[in-house]
Amino acid sequence: MGSITPCLWFDGDAEEAAELYTSVVRNSGILNVSRAGQGAAAPALTVSFDLDGQSFVALNGGPQFSFTEAVSFQISCGDQAEVDRYWSALTADGGEESRCGWLKDRFGLSWQIIPTALPSLIGGDDAEGAQRAMAAMLGMQKLDIAALEAAYRGD
């Protein structure tokens, strides 16, 4: 089977979006920009980029389609500093915070910023602890690992 490359449809700001995403996600970069004309000032038609080993194409397709929460990208974070870094970078300049670790960046693309500890807290062996952690998560926008752990313990 060939590789699968998600194609993201933008209304004129594909290159700007690819620049943001590759600046935020480690081990990432823009691979190629196909332009509608000669020179760097010509508008981008497509931008091929890589986010930590996953290939993407950003397409300037026009205003016909926009992103919805039906598609989101999940970033697993090892600690609170990483959660905070992604959250800040992706909500900057017009992004929108949502609930339970979800946000929209300024281009309308949805992201889930999820601590790697979350599955063991909301699905752990202690059913009551898991319920408390889930209830805490449901009241959060950006996820707070210490608060989730405290809720799980019953503190």
Image (tube, helix red, strand yellow):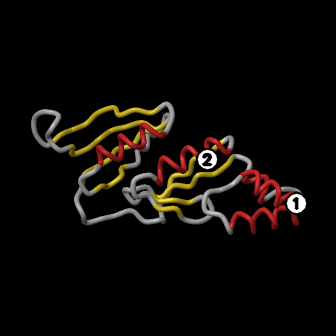
Label number found at residue 126: none
Residue 73 visible within the image:
yes
Q: Nearer the viewer, residue 140 or 47?
A: 140
Where does residue 47 sit, x and y in percent of width and height? 29, 41
Circle 1: element type: loop
Where does residue 35 sit, x and y in percent of width and height? 18, 40
Q: Is residue 4 above or below residue 94?
A: above
Q: Disc 2 or disc 1, which is closer to the eye?
A: 1
Total numbered labels placed on residues in the image: 2
**What residue sits 58% from the left and 52% below the top?**
113
**What residue sits 72% from the left and 53% below the top?**
118
Q: Is residue 113 above or below residue 39?
A: below
Label number found at residue 83: 2
Q: Is residue 137 above or below residue 25?
A: below
Q: Quadrant of residue 66?
A: bottom left
Pointers 2 and 1 in contact (CB under 8 A)?
no
103 with respect to 31 (left or right): right
Q: Quadrant of residue 81?
A: top right
The Cα–Cα distance between marks 2 and 1, rounded to whole angstroms, is: 22 Å
> Which amino acid, by three-letter code, is at mark 2?
Val
Q: Residue furthest left?
A: 38
Where does residue 141 sit, x and y in percent of width and height? 61, 62
**What residue sits 42% from the left and 36% below the top?**
50
90 with respect to 60 (left or right): right
> Which amino acid, by three-letter code, is at mark 1?
Asp
Label 1: few (<14), some (14–19) or many (≥20) C-alpha neighbours in 10 Å: few
